[in-house]
Amino acid sequence: MTRAAGRWTTPATQALRVGPGFDLAGLDRRSTPGWSGDKKSAPDALAAQGERLSELQERLFAHGRTGGDRAVLLVLQGMDTAGKGGIVRHVLGMVDPQGVALRSFGVPTAAEKRHHYLWRIRRALPRPGYIGVFDRSHYEDVLVVKVEGLVPAGEVEERYDEINAFEAEVASSGTRVVKVALMVSLDEQAARLRERLERPDKHWKYNPGDIDARERWPLYQAAYQTALERTSTDVAPWHVVPADRKWYARLAVGALLQDALEGLDLGWPPADFDVETELRRLEASDPRT
Ligand code: AMP
Ligand code: MG
């Protein structure tokens, strides 16, 4: 039996990157940009990707343990049901959990509200050696906040530049910022919300407020378009991932993460002891002899 092969004909970083002239409205959310195979090609590709990601993550962790300053931050944005949780489970799930620092951002708590919107974000940045994952992020502060009018429009307007400056600072501290917007279609979102309502094991994921946000879909899409075009920078570019096909979204985010880790170009840290000496010591260390 021959397995269906798949491959990137255009690297995910290139195929998905938000550049000049980006138009969210024109995105086919069932499409699979850059990938040549179909669903049957996904399992093998994911398994191979998992092995590579796992090694790269371990190198990053070793680097952090030996005084290095590099880290990776994966920012996940998307409407409800876009698949952010699935990315965490299936993509980050392929690497050692001790090296992943996951943080979900919901409605700010009373304590968080007393601070600048970037306060809780700064505190959650990954330490050297870690892959930080933000399930929602400071982008909520120009998305839901804008759509719901939670702060004056003029203030939202100033946030794009402020976010760019903040991310440039994060990048210059040694953290690679990978920003991913998972884009599900209105029809697929309806199907996924219906499933959450029809299956008792999914009720916990459902929030009646999801329907309110769904009703404001066009406003959210417009807010996404603005955020994506105003904050896709060289040091922290956005990638827009069509998310109606979960297998593709997972493969794509895995590829983006892999690219970021490969870009760190980390080897294994050299021993800070003399290996030959330690081998001799080991040989002579059996207390029974
Ligand atoms: P979930 O990710 O499904 O657990 O939902 C989290 C909710 O928190 C979403 O409805 C977000 O829009 C909301 N949220 C996240 N950050 C903010 C923020 N800064 N201001 C207001 N709502 C937010
Ligand atoms: Mg939700």
Image (cartoon, rainbow, N blue to C red):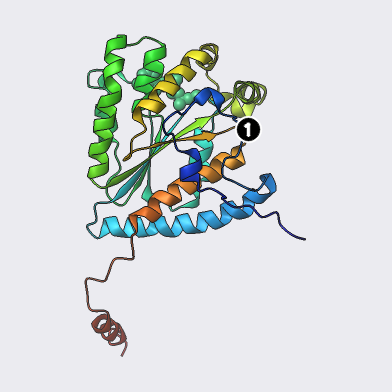
Q: Nearer the viewer, residue 123 or 266?
A: 266
* Residue drawn at the location 36% of the way across and 20% of the way down: 142
The quarter of the picture where the C terminus appears is bottom left
Up-down relation of residue 250 to residue 143 (above or below):
below
Q: Nearer the viewer, residue 160 or 202?
A: 160
Q: Residue furthest right?
A: 1
What amino acid does circle 1 point to? Arg
The quarter of the picture where the N terminus appears is bottom right
Q: How many marks?
A: 1
Give the image location of residue 200, x and y in percent. Answer: 64, 26
Give the image location of residue 235, x and y in percent. Answer: 31, 40
Give the image location of residue 134, x and y in percent. Answer: 39, 35
Up-down relation of residue 230 to residue 177 (above or below):
above
Q: Is residue 157 left or right of residue 201?
A: left
* Residue drawn at the location 34% of the way across and 29% of the way down: 231
For residue 92, say whether it is visible: no
For residue 288, say whether it is visible: yes
Give SS at disc 1.
loop
* Residue drawn at the location 27% of the way across and 58% of the way down: 65
